[in-house]
Amino acid sequence: MRFTDRVVMVTGAAKGIGAATARAFGREGARVALLDVDASGVAAVADEVRRRGGDALSLATDVTVAADVRVSVEAIVGRWTRVDVLVNNAGGFAILRRAEDIPDDEWDAILRLNVTSAFLCVKAVLPVMRRQRSGRIVNLSSIVGRGGAVAVTLHYATAKAGVLGLTRQLAREVAPDGITVNAVAPGTVATERFRSLRTAEETQRLAESVPLRRVAEPDEIAEAVLFLASDAAAYITGAVLDVNGGLMMA
């Protein structure tokens, strides 16, 4: 197994890509810390990891609050002494709006959820990783942060572009400490939220716009994350892995 006894911290792990990523790391032998503001949801995923033979810790955490993040990282280190992988997956948006209709407080909240949360988690784990002289950080961006291939709301696109800037600058800063930082930029993914908001006909229309003629499954994004966190990607840093079925080819 690729991650036997490595300690992996996954944010936004109660559902969707985060839950799929936590399960995948668990199957690969990792000790998985699952963080989410949804306490019952993240506990259920952690239970699933344990039932399958993995080692998991669920932590009810608001990753937009620095104190919450610090407490959770202290709990992880207290239990397992280290953090080998950080997956900054927490993010999203609630509703599509035109730029002029976005309330100021909603702009702030979306950037905080998608970008500031990643910064706060990075800030909390970096002293541990620097001390270890090793670490992998994988940030979840989006196709909308890479280009205008998908119609989406302005604050979310801006936030996901910000995640890419954070990824590149941080990669340069921490490389001398043996830490790599990369991003995954998914296209449309068939998460629970995606399925709940669209009819079968709408999903089919979206699928037909993708060269591979389907949307991604969360497990496919999880596998991209695991690759960037693995030894196979040891010489990759500051990179963005596009997983969009060919919808955007850079």
Image (spheres, helix red, strand yellow):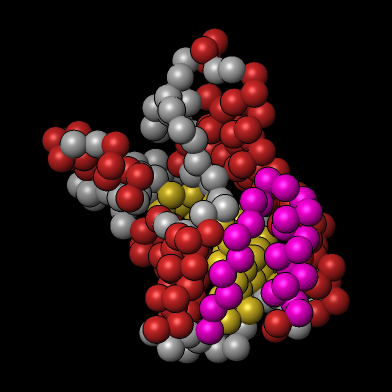
- Residue 149 in the image: state x and y as whole percent: 40, 33
Q: Position of residue 131 (x, y in %)?
A: 85, 76
Q: Nearer the viewer, residue 40 or 119?
A: 40
- Left or right: residue 124 versus residue 59 is right
- Name above or below for residue 53 compared with residue 18: below
In percent of width and height, residue 153 lies at: 47, 26
Is residue 94 shown in magenta?
no
Left or right of residue 181: residue 151: left
At 77% across and 70% down in the image, what residue appears?
A: 74
Residue furthest to the top in view is 100
Above or below, comparing residue 197 to residue 79 in the picture = above
Q: Magenta includes 60?
A: yes
Please give the name of the residue rendered at 64% of the width and 51% of the height, measured from the top-left corner. Answer: 62
Considering every residue shown, the one lying at the far front of the view is 40
Left or right of 146 on screen, residue 205: left
> Can the viewer see residue 228 in this picture?
no
Magenta-tinted stretch? 55-78
The image shows a total of numbered marks equal to 0
Q: In which quarter of the view is residue 236 placed?
A: bottom right
Is any atom of residue 186 visible in this view? yes
Judge whether 99 appears above or below 4 on screen.
Answer: above
Q: Residue at x 46, y 41 (%)?
A: 143
Instruction: Decide if residue 111 is on the left or right side of residue 16.
Output: right
Q: Residue furthest left?
A: 201
Q: Quadrant of residue 82?
A: bottom right
* Residue drawn 64% across the image and 23% down it: 105
The x and y percentages for residue 237 are 66, 62
